[in-house]
Every structure is written in structure tokens, then in C-alpha cells.
Amino acid sequence: MFSILIPSLNNLDYLKLCIKSIKKNSSLKHEIIVHVNKGEDGTIEFLKNENIKFSFTKYNAGICEGVNLAAKLTTTNYFLYAHDDFYFCPDWDEILFNEVKKIGHNNFYLSGTMMHNGQIAFNCGESPNNFNEKKFLNEYKNHNLYDFQGTTWAPMLVHKEIWEKVGGFSEEFFPGTGSDPDFNMKLWNQGVRIFKGINNCKVYHFGSIVLRRKINEIYNKPNYGSKGAKLFLLKWGITIKFFKKYYLQSNTKYKKSLVKPDYNISFILNYLICKLYFLYLKLFYNKQILRKSL
């Protein structure tokens, strides 16, 4: 059914729990493909023992390159990108696939809803060692948001056809910050207008453990995230905030597929602010240097 693409960087305890939850709580049959960055903690041996496909780099390829490499091993028509620090709730996949069937075409971007570190606050532990699985499974249905518009979050599901049209994730957003809205912008330019977050499809998120955990250690760049936002602006001419507010209408209740934004006074004023910031970056930042510094 789905090809579940999971990048991982020496995060075996979380990855084991993530894969356990997929096997335990899925209603449909899927293939799991992990991209192993470095793999110094026994991840490769674990995946071999579990007969799980994986791609591998000796270095930290980051999220974008890692997922792109894993995607080359897929055999299904649906790609689901997930973090290795997710715990998938029961029937998550059936809920997503029912939504796909209702849409009836391939131009969509669907996501689940993250709990704990995400859209819904519900703490059942900070790591696999103290995760209260029993409490979580008994109570997660009591904690809800709504189906929301303009999602840019994992776990996200797209069709292989649209993934290949846009070329997957943009690897210049290393190791991943800014890559989600960039991917959405590429989908928007291909005519995708359904960006829907599904309330009933839930995952527990331990909290961006996946690859960003050691960014400051590895690259000594505490302001990394802002550089991802700058790269987005230099690439697209508008800010992530502007794109999410006026195009995706992010975090509002989902009503219907999106349309082109209304070019009202608020849109025009904020668009001009984006252009001023864009010109500032062009004057004071060298694009190539910025990309290399990421």
C-alpha cells in the first residue's frame, strides 16, 4: 500500500519503537524503507534482522537527500514520509487511505496530526524508556483538534506521480529545515490544491529527535533554522510565513480545496514587505555562500 520513508541518524531506540508501532497498529500492508545516516549504533544490523529495506550513507545526508535515496527503493504508488521518533496510532493508515479514495485523484498532500510535540498537547513520555504506551493507546482518542488546512507536517502522504514531477525534496535545504514548505510550494506550482491534515490520523511525536538533534554539535550553527527560511525566500521570493498564511491558509479548519489567494490590501502590503526583505538578502548575502553554509 504505502512506502514509508524514514530517515534516521543513530537513533535506534526511537526507530525500533516507530517500526514496532507501524507493525502493530497498521490495518494495511506497507513497505518500510529507512535511510541510515552513519549507522554507528547498530541500526543496520537491526534492519537486516527485521528484513527491512534501507539506503545508507556513511555521512549525515540529512532529511532531504536521505528520503530521496530511500524513495529510489520504493515499489508502491504512495510515499509516506515519517520521522523515526513517531509512534503511529491504531488504524492511522486506513484513515489516510479512505481520504485518498474520497479525493479520487493524485494531486493531494495529506498529513496526520502530531501529538505531544505537535498540534495536540498530550504527554505520555519524553523517550522510549519512559513512554507510557498503555496510557497513550487508552486515551489518545480523547484528545482532538480538527481536520486542518494547509498542512506542511509529517507524517505526510503523496502519490508517486506528483513526487516524481517535483523531484522529491530539495536537497539544498540541508539537513531539512525549510524543506517542508519548499516541497509544498513545488506541489502548489504543479497545481496541487489539497493540503489537508487529518485529525483522526494521529502519531505521537517525541520531538524532532530525528536529524536536527545534533545540528549544533556537528555544524556549530545555532541559528540554522533562520537560514532555511532565508533560503526559501531567496528561492521563491516570499517568506514561509507569507506562503503559509495567504496560499496554504495553514492551521485553519479544513473546508475545501484551496484556490489562488485574494489579492487584497493585506496581501499586497505583506507581499511588498517580502520583496523588501528579499532585496535586503540579495544585497547582503551571497546565495552560494548561504547554500554552502547550510
Image: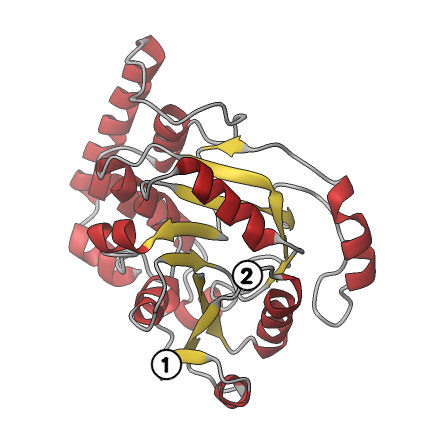
Work out whether residue 10 or residue 222 is closer to the camera in this orientation and state it: 10
Q: Split into 4 quadrants, where in the image is the N terminus? A: bottom left
Mark 1 residue type: Phe
Residue 132 visible, this orientation: no
Mark 2 residue type: Leu
Give the residue pinned by disc 1: 56
Give the residue pinned by disc 2: 28
Q: In terms of image quadrants, where is residue 193?
A: top left
Q: Residue 96 at what x, y percent from top left?
A: 52, 47
Is disc 2 surrounded by few (<14), some (14 to 19) or many (20+) residues within 10 Å? some
Q: Which mark is residue 151?
A: none
Question: Eyeballing the image, is 223 above or below 107?
Answer: below
Q: Secondary structure at mark 1?
A: strand
Q: In terms of image quadrants, where is residue 124?
A: bottom right
Work out whether residue 206 or residue 217 is closer to the camera in this orientation and state it: 206
Judged left or right of residue 287, residue 148 is right
